Image: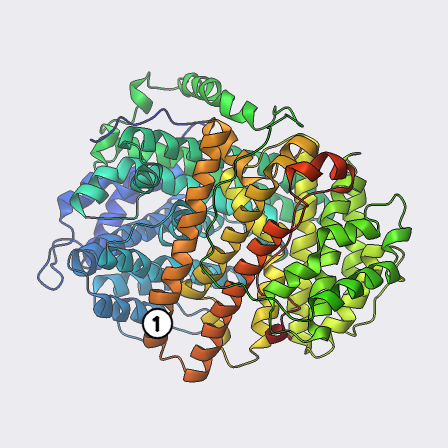
Amino acid sequence: MSFRLPEFYLSYPARLNPNLQRAREHSKAWARQMEMIDVPQRGKEIWSEADLDRDDYALLCAYTHPDCDSDELDLVTDWYVWVFYFDDHFVELYKRDPDLTAAREHLDRLRAFMPVDEPITEQPTNPVEAGLADLWRRTVPSMSADWRRRFADSTKALLDESLWELHNISENRLSNPIEYIEMRRKVGGAPWSANLVEHAVGMEVPAELAATRPLKVLRDTFSDAVHLRNDLFSYEREVTDEGELSNGVLVFERFLGCDSQEAAETVNDLLTSRMHQFEHTALTEVPRLLDERGVDPAGRMAVLGYAKGLQDWQSGGHEWHMASGRYPEGGGSSSVLGGPTGLGTAGAYIAKSLISTAPQRLRSFTRVPFQPVGPVQRPELEVPFELRLCPHLDVSREHAVDWSREMGMFADAPPVWDEAAVRFNDLPLCAAGLDPDASLEELDLASHWLVWGTYGDDLYPQRYGHVRDVAGAKAQNERLKQVMTDTGEPGIVPVNMMERGLADLWRRTTAPMNARERRSLRSAVEVMIDSWVWELDNQALNHVPDPVDYVEMRRATFGSDMTISLARFAHGDVVPPELYETRAVQNLENSAIDCATMLNDVFSYRKEIEFEGEVHNAVLVVQNFLDCDQDRAFEIVHGLFNARMEQFLHVIDVELPALYQEREVSPEAQEALNQHAEELKDWLSGILNWHEQVARYRDSELRHNAPMSGIRSLYAPSTPWDPVLG
């Protein structure tokens, strides 16, 4: 192997289901019945009986689901036999000699065997289809419609995103680390496994909780840890034998410019960080969610049973990797890292694991705030798009000051911004670059949204963060949510700048919208203001975020959901909603957003770290995670910025045209999506220009303006004020 397996973080003992042998016998008989064993497909042998025995998926399921009864273990094991067969079948028939057309046809047919509400009517033509049809009929009848939809979605994602891997192989394209984590989460199938955990423990997560941040974080951290662990064990098999490019060790090896051993250690550090995040969320955010929502005992038991099931899966999955012949790198032994075996020995590994990973956990909670960083030599961040500015800028600047006064900003006590601060931050300059073709009215609306959002992002840490009043921030958020009504008139009497400003913006922005669009915008604004509370939580705990959690939550603090929603509304019904959910459009938007957030973090680093004691900055997050110096952290963030910009351009040049052809997208929808890409270019160039021109982040101004400066945020692409966005 190209590297030694690192020392894994193990915090929970693996346990073995006593029904293992029955599951082995049953799954082999089932696989034979589905013609998965010793039956060539298109002239290629996928599995022999010896292959199935060697890989031992029954052992995987007995370890990952130690408490379910024998019938449930048989069902779950059949699912894992099917999913691994699907993967190997896809490799042999479509990956070794890339065949995108045939692969797409194969995946499209599988949708017919996963109906949420109707019976299966299609006839299977191969073992993958036959296995899926049989399992679907045996699994979904006992579950709610909500679970069925979630399980169908995660299964389709697992299948469909196999094309992402195939596209990369066809182009010989290696993904960047952010893209890799996002896409591996889908194609790797762990969210699918998380859904099966609910079935195995016999308790469904209440539908109203499944989409909340704490439950989403549990699922995503579980998924990332499962996939990163698998990447470490499967590197040799995937990269050397299969020519695979979707492996985290390879991604980090190329991105960091290091050898495979250092890359493997970095992947393992990220795996550990994700498991720490899982535990942090389970112990802090989940109990608070249950209390705040008033969840009944049955719902609490379901959520806690689900969390325990995910924890069992992590421990059991590691033990299976060590034992299974599918990954000879594990040594073919069920002992963990060659240590003692037998009843009562698990604690020795856990104690050792906790001690060895303690420095990483401690670094995340023991940073000394307000450390001097000195003048910072910022890397050059290239945004290769022409800057254009709206000609109404000067007039809009004065209107922004007038609006701020009218909303009561200068009368708020204690004061956060005065008139000088509004002029100093010059947010109309940003709006003028974001939407260079705006009318004066549209530019004013743009500027006022930016003033409101940036003022709020400064206000929350000053008013609630310094005194650790998270409850006060949540109460303010609840009032802001009551401002956003379907009628456009606030449901409360606004009493401060945040409430008056949002009421005015809500009325002006939603006037031309229908009810569906208003609900969507309301949800997006809620995501943004709730993310401010996430920042306050971390600030109160002095917690430097996990790098993956940071990237994903930074999009929320940047208001991207809000502005993306408004961008879509502007194109009306020309673009079918399902196109916005495709990989290409998601990659287009997220890569642009990540470029903007990293750009902001680079410019605001000294302001936030030295003068504000912040923990939410990409440079600091990288520095903390890799335990590296400041210069190296800047270098890595710069590399990530360039990689995401390259991906943004790749989507425009390659992925969008391919999407148009694959989906037979209408000319009108193509034009709208191409315009959306142009708007994102304006957005990026406008953001860079604003950072370069305003004094907000200049060293010469930091000491003088530190008391008036707050967090950072310019938030999001294609803003609500862009004329195309309405």
* Residue 470 lies in quadrant: top right
Q: Is residue 509 visible?
A: yes
Q: Does 275 appear above or below 185?
A: above
Q: Position of residue 631 (x, y in %)?
A: 47, 31
* Residue 365 lies in quadrant: top right
* Residue 620 lies in quadrant: top right
Q: Position of residue 54 (x, y in %)?
A: 19, 39
> Under tag 1, what secondary structure?
helix
Residue 19 located left or right of residue 704: left
Residue 277 located left or right of residue 232: right
- Colour pattern of the rendering: rainbow
Residue 540 located left or right of residue 677: right
Q: Position of residue 107 (x, y in %)?
A: 30, 66
**Disc 1 residue type (three-letter):** Pro
Q: Residues within 10 Å of mark 1 (few under 14, many from 20)?
A: some
Q: Nearer the viewer, residue 321 or 268?
A: 268
Image point (42%, 59%), residue name: 648
Please state, as top left, top right, bottom left or bottom right, where the C terminus lies in the image. bottom right
Q: Which of 629 and 176 is in front in this view?
A: 629
Q: Where is residue 225 in the image (x, y as percent from the top left)?
A: 42, 39
Q: Can residue 112 be seen in this view?
A: no
The residue furthest bottom is: 667
Residue 169 located left or right of residue 302: left
Q: Which of 670 and 547 is in front in this view?
A: 670
Please state, as top left, top right, bottom left or bottom right, where the N terminus lies in the image. top left
Q: How many marks?
A: 1
Q: Mark 1 points at which residue?
A: 657
Image point (25%, 39%), residue name: 235
